[in-house]
């Protein structure tokens, strides 16, 4: 049956990823105090420093109401009104956490994507995270850089020096050993690749 990585083709759309779409993140809106009942305003996005769309919103106790214009495949602009229900779950130490309920599948989610006409969850649009489209080597490099930025005071894409301030030496040594293991693993992959050439 299928070759290496063939399972990825039937699981996810190989085009856009969640990170490439316009997103509404409930955690961001909550942190900014934008989800109080009666509050309204606009959300906007930018791409490469240029404005890349905006929507108006109005918040009630139970729903987020969106009002925006959309067009499909370069067609005519049309006005769209969409209501998104909230769901709440209790937190362990009191209070509650707010979620969106996806308008199509009723899934409890923290992020909705404007990949099509409506804002829906990534599952409905079959949008993978960017990391799910990465190969084994790219994923290893991403993890190595992320770890390098976490443990080194100065980190310049592949080269790190100086322990991060406030980090215990024991923690640094443990994470540095993991960083070195990733470096060795990457060198092993590159050796295999060059051998195949």
Image (cartoon, rainbow, N blue to C red):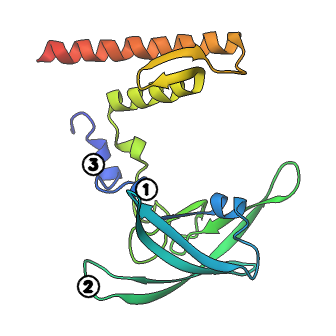
Identify the residue at horizontal 58%, vertical 65% (top origin): 107
Rendered view: 104 above or below 27: below
The image position of residue 11, as x and y in percent, is 35, 51
Badge 1 local density, few (<14 within 10 Å), some, or many (20+)? many
Q: Dot 3: within a 10 Å radius of its alpha carbon, few (fewer than 14), some, or many (20 or more) residues? A: few
Residue at 54%, 10% in the rendered image? 177
Of the image marks 1 and 3, the number of the one nearer the N terminus: 3
Q: Residue furthest left?
A: 197
Residue at image location 70% in from the left, 63% down from the top: 30
How many numbered circles are shown? 3
Residue 121 pos. (x, y %): 50, 64
Q: Is residue 14 above or below residue 71?
A: above
Q: Position of residue 17 (x, y in %)?
A: 38, 54
Disc 1 marks which residue?
A: 18
| On-image quarter of the C terminus | top left
Query: In the depicted view, which residue is nearer to us: 55 or 14?
Result: 55
- Which residue occupies the foreground of this view, 134 or 168? 168
Determine which residue is flagged by label 3: 9
Q: SS of the residue at dot 1? A: helix
Q: Quadrant of residue 153?
A: top right
Relative to 53, residue 1 above or below: above
Left or right of residue 26, residue 154 in this image? left
Location of the N terminus by quadrant is: top left
Please give the residue where the numbered disc 2 appears in the rendered image: 75
Badge 2: residue crowd in 10 Å (few <14, some 14–19, many ≥20): few
Q: Nearer the viewer, mark 1 or mark 3?
A: 1
Q: Earlier in the sequence, mark 3 or mark 2?
A: 3
The picture quadrant where one finds residue 132 is: top left
Residues at circles 2 and 1 in contact by the CB criterion of under 8 Å = no
């Amino acid at each position: 049956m299928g070759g290496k990585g063939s399972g990825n083709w039937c699981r996810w759309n190989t085009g856009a990823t969640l990170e490439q779409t316009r997103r509404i993140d409930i955690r961001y809106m909550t942190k900014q105090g934008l989800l109080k009942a009666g509050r309204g305003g606009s959300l906007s996005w930018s791409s490469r420093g240029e404005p890349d769309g905006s929507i108006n919103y109005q918040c009630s106790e139970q729903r987020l109401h969106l009002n925006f214009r959309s067009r499909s495949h370069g067609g005519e602009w049309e006005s769209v009104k969409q209501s998104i229900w909230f769901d709440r779950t209790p937190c362990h130490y009191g209070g509650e956490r707010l979620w969106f309920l996806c308008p199509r599948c009723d899934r409890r989610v923290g992020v909705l994507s404007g990949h099509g006409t409506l804002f829906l969850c990534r599952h409905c649009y079959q949008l993978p995270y960017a990391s799910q489209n990465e190969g084994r080597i790219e994923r290893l490099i991403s993890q190595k850089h992320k770890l390098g930025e976490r443990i080194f005071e100065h980190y310049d894409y592949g080269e790190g020096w100086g322990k991060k301030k406030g980090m215990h030496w024991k923690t640094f040594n443990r994470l540095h050993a993991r960083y070195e293991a990733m470096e060795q693993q990457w060198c092993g992959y590159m050796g295999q690749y060059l051998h195949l050439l």
